[in-house]
Image (cartoon, rainbow, N blue to C red):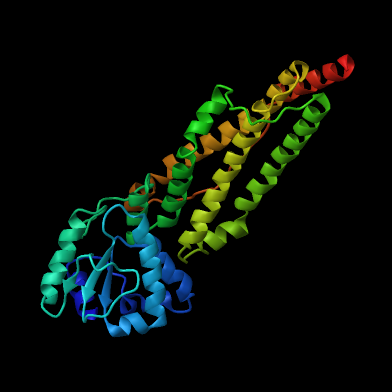
Amino acid sequence: AQTLAALLNEDGVRVFYDEYVAAELWGSDLYTVLDEVYRKRARFTIVFISKHYVSKPWTRHERQSAQARAMLEVGAYLLPVRLDDSELPGLRPTVAYIDARRTPFEEIAALVKRKLVDSPGTTAQDSPTLRVPRDEGQQRELLAQRPPGWEYLLYAGVLWQRREALESKWCDHQIGYSRRNGRHLDNNEAISLMHHALDDLKVCGPNLEKVLDPVAQERAFGAPGEPGNPALIEHIAARLVSIYDDMLDIAAMLRGTTVPSETAQLMEVTARLTDMPLQQIRDAVDQLVAEIDLIPDKLARGEKIVIELTVAISIDDNVLQELARRQTQQVLEG
């Protein structure tokens, strides 16, 4: 492993090898870090199969993380190199391997570089400028290279990707469409449901504050001068988008419930309370992605960068007034 790592490193290939990252690993929770590397960050994992590899607990942990990733990949991810004929649990005998007993390490290094040519990213010294990742391949490349400001690029990328995954729900919301959810309520039950929906909507604000709390942000992005934690960055970005998703669900639930005709308009107005905060979150994500996309260029010019991770949401006063008017009218008619 040391020999191959050295050969690849000399050719500009980024290699995760314990001796090369001793300082970064010092004091870290290796169980978590190694799972992150083998399951998310690497483009390929090279396994040196031997009786020693099979018997050690740490290599077993690495193997399980790598095999979990391999299950999700369309192409090859786990690249076996045999040092003896030991059986590796979970590795099918039909998987092609390189036999290090007959193949020089210089040739194995050349094969690795050929493999990388067809994978996302680059092995060249002059890497292309990495910006906000729009897909998993770009995100994996970002985490592999970790250029200056990678924490913010990752955060914006997760926000963008998670929001894009909800575009169908957003399009439904824009046209006021929602599939029937099978609930049929009378007027009293409908009013109760609306009150519960309003309570759920009120929770979105405090939850957003928790996601954007400076303490939570520092835990994820790291204190000044310290690297961030990719798992925590991804977590808080996903939680922010989950608030957006919750609002979409609240509106869809109200619109998908069958109620008496005299209450239907009240339900629709209640659903429309989500319109403004949803648009505000979308605008905030778009603005943040646009700003963070410029980080590499600004760093190259030596400019000072200030990033504020803020999202302000509010309710449309006109919709609130209409809701109050219809509620009053409902009471008078009732």
Residue at x 55% of width, y 21% of height: 175
User: Residue 69, position in %: x, y?
Assistant: 37, 60
Q: Is residue 166 left or right of residue 145?
A: right
User: Residue 204, position in %: x, y?
Assistant: 67, 42
What quarter of the picture does the N terminus occupy? bottom left
Residue 93 visible at all: yes
Q: Is residue 268 above or below residue 212?
A: above
Q: Quick one: 208 or 186, which is closer to the camera?
A: 186
**Which of the 4 image quarters holds residue 107?**
bottom left
Residue at x 36% of width, y 71% of height: 63
Q: Quick one: 116 or 6, which is closer to the camera?
A: 116
User: Residue 87, position in %: x, y?
Assistant: 29, 77
**Which of the 4 image quarters holds residue 79?**
bottom left
Q: Residue furthest top?
A: 333
Residue 38 visible at all: no
Residue at x 42% of width, y 40% of height: 290
Tag count: 0
Q: Is residue 150 left or right of residue 192?
A: left
Q: Quick one: 211 or 174, which is closer to the camera?
A: 174
Q: Is residue 313 above or below residue 13?
A: above
User: Residue 313, position in %: x, y?
Assistant: 64, 37
Q: Is residue 258 left or right of residue 171?
A: right
What quarter of the picture does the C terminus occupy? top right
Residue at x 17% of width, y 67% of height: 11
Q: Quick one: 318 or 57, which is closer to the camera?
A: 57
